[in-house]
Image (cartoon, grey):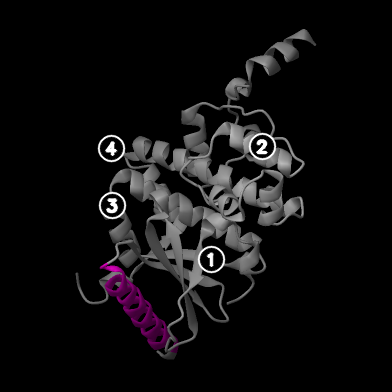
Amino acid sequence: MHDDEDLQVVGTTSDYLIQQLTDEEEGKDSAIEYLRSGFLSSAADTLFYMRLQAGLTQAQVAERLHTKQSAIARLESDSDGGISLHRYIDFALACGMVPHNITFAPLESVINYTIAQPEILYTQGNYEEWLKTNAQPASATVESAVQVESNSDE
Amino acid sequence: MGLRSETVFSTLRSFTEVVDGFDKRVSQTIKVHTIHFQGAWRASRHDGELPSSCCIEQDKKVVDGSYQLYQIRVGPGRGYRAWVMFLDNSPDAYWIYAFKKEKDRQPEDMERARAIAQRYWEQIRRGNNA
């Protein structure tokens, strides 16, 4: 590599990401890994923001969960998805919160969303807003069986 | 650094070449973590408002230029380090280098990150003076 070639600006981080996600050969696999890691990272970050919103310290949450502050720090930084669902809900309850039911969306549609706006967090609200302006099928989001049954009773 | 909410993050080839060289899962996880960091950075007013998962640490070595260097823990198990350079009095920030955290190689990689930052700073300065 020429001495200063490595100092070339490739583009914004979004440009770099889009380039990977739209690659003809490996784009889909890259997108799957990206979305997988994104979900796990968001889940961990949500614990941090939830605790902050509740006005609690890690030590206070630890006391409520009968554990150590260091264990809470580990849960909040666990972006590899090692936390159990059981522990996740206990953490939320300790903060006086309950998560919404998890919903799902078709992979292809979410890949398109990510390519269209890679730096906008993939939340249900952001995704549904994007769907409205991009004429995707309204049935794109899959709710839990309980929600679907409940809706059909109305 | 300017207002955090206005920060524009770009990537240097020295960063993308290293990240693209890791296996796909590592590479994508690093990208996710950098994008998440960017969002969290823009939404924060100070480091205390950054999620624990960001694991940000300012490089303590004094730099010869108007910029700050930060090391972020990224990748699977947060076992990799990504270095980002924030210019003083500017909204611009650059991902400059990344490496796998290994006991023996860390000082060498950190020095490499610092050297890239310093060279890039000189390039910016030359550009401004031209």
Residue B106 among those drawn in magenta: yes
Q: Who's the residue at 51% across and 47% down the image?
A: A78
Element type where label 2 sits in the image: helix
Asked if residue A124 can be seen in this view, the reply is no
At a point 60% along the width and 25% down the height, the residue shown is A141
- Residue B16 position within the rendered picture, expressed as x and y whole percent measured from the top left: 33, 59
Number of marks in picture: 4
Q: Which residue is mark 1?
A: B8
Q: Which residue is mark 3?
A: B22
Question: Magenta residues?
Answer: B104-128
Q: Earlier in the sequence, mark 3 or mark 1?
A: 1
Q: Identify residue for label 2.
A: A90
The answer to whether the residue labelled 3 contacts the one labelled 1, judged by CB atoms less than 8 Å apart, is: no
Q: Amino acid at mark 2?
A: Asp
State the quadrant of the C terminus of chain B. bottom left
**Alpha carbon distance from label 2 to label 3:** 36 Å
- Which is in the foreground here, disc 3 or disc 4? 3
